[in-house]
Image (tube, rainbow, N blue to C red):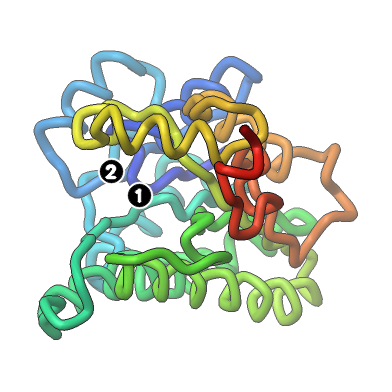
Amino acid sequence: MKTALITGAARGIGLATARGLIAEGWQVAVLDRDSAELAKVAELLPDAMVIDADVSVPADVERAVSQIEAGFGRLDGLVNNAGVADFGPIRETTFERWRRVMETNLDGPFLMTQAFTDLLAADGGGAVVNITSISGLRASTLRVAYGTSKAALAQLTLQQAVELGELGIRVNAVAPGPVATKLAMAVHSPEIIAAYHDALPLNRYGKEEEVAAAITFLLSDKASFVTGQILAADGGFEATGIGLPALRD
């Protein structure tokens, strides 16, 4: 049975990915630092291993390795999904806010992939999927820390793919566009939602399950010759470039 570890899996895309993999017969471990939400996941997914840890803390990462070794004895897939968002003007983004984003969004995937390399390399090699963002492919206002962290994660993906490919480990990334998570729907005003719809060729937000399907594909044997790629699951958002709504009327 194939095994996967998904970080930031207490909600959203991470949780949807865990559900999708379990449905396809994978053995899954879910990791998150939100203890309260993680307890709910333990009830929702009773067959999943639950790991309460922070990917930006080296000691927590090493403990996660020990738990996976003891519980699974192998690892076929690692999904670096844990991330934090911090939106605000550059002049108001303190160094503390900047570091808070970087330590989870960039340090976390570095630490996790490095720590799990030996397990992933065993049995012929596994797969890593880093979750970047469309904000790492195109700039947007108010996202100096978030966008930069995701752009750096895209480059980290390439670095990991080039080096770890020699061990049989494939490394790719999924860059979600606007996704209808509970958080997004709670904070996006009707004006923002309308603007996104206008900028998206598919004219709608994505679903968590649609992004999870892209992640599952990259983890699977169907993507056995795919590595070093950034797959934008974004409804065509990146393809629209600047996009002038007036030209579409």
**Would you say 149 lies left or right of 2 here?**
left
Amino acid type, label 1: Gln
Instruction: State the residue in front, 81 or 220.
Output: 81
Mark 2 lies on residue: 51
Residue 196 in view of the camera:
yes
Amino acid type, label 2: Ile
Disc number lying in front (2 or 1) = 2
Residue 75 in view of the camera:
no
Tell me residue 43's x, y (percent): 24, 15
Residue sitting at 79 percent across and 65 percent down?
168
Q: Which mark is residue 175?
A: none
* Element carrying mark 1: helix
Number of residue marks: 2
| Rendered position, 36 above or below 242 | above
CB atoms of marks 2 and 1 within 8 Å: yes
Tell me residue 1's x, y (percent): 66, 29
| Rendered position, 187 above or below 223 | above
Residue sitting at 44 percent across and 43 percent down?
6
Tell me residue 60's x, y (percent): 24, 63
Mark 1 lies on residue: 67
Q: Quadrant of residue 24?
A: top right
Residue sitting at 64 percent across and 29 percent down?
213
* Element carrying mark 2: strand
Give the Cα distance between marks 2 and 1: 8 Å
Instruction: State the residue in front, 3 or 66.
Output: 3
Tell me residue 52's x, y (percent): 21, 45
**Would you say 196 lies left or right of 91 here?**
right
Instruction: State the residue in front, 173 or 44.
Output: 173
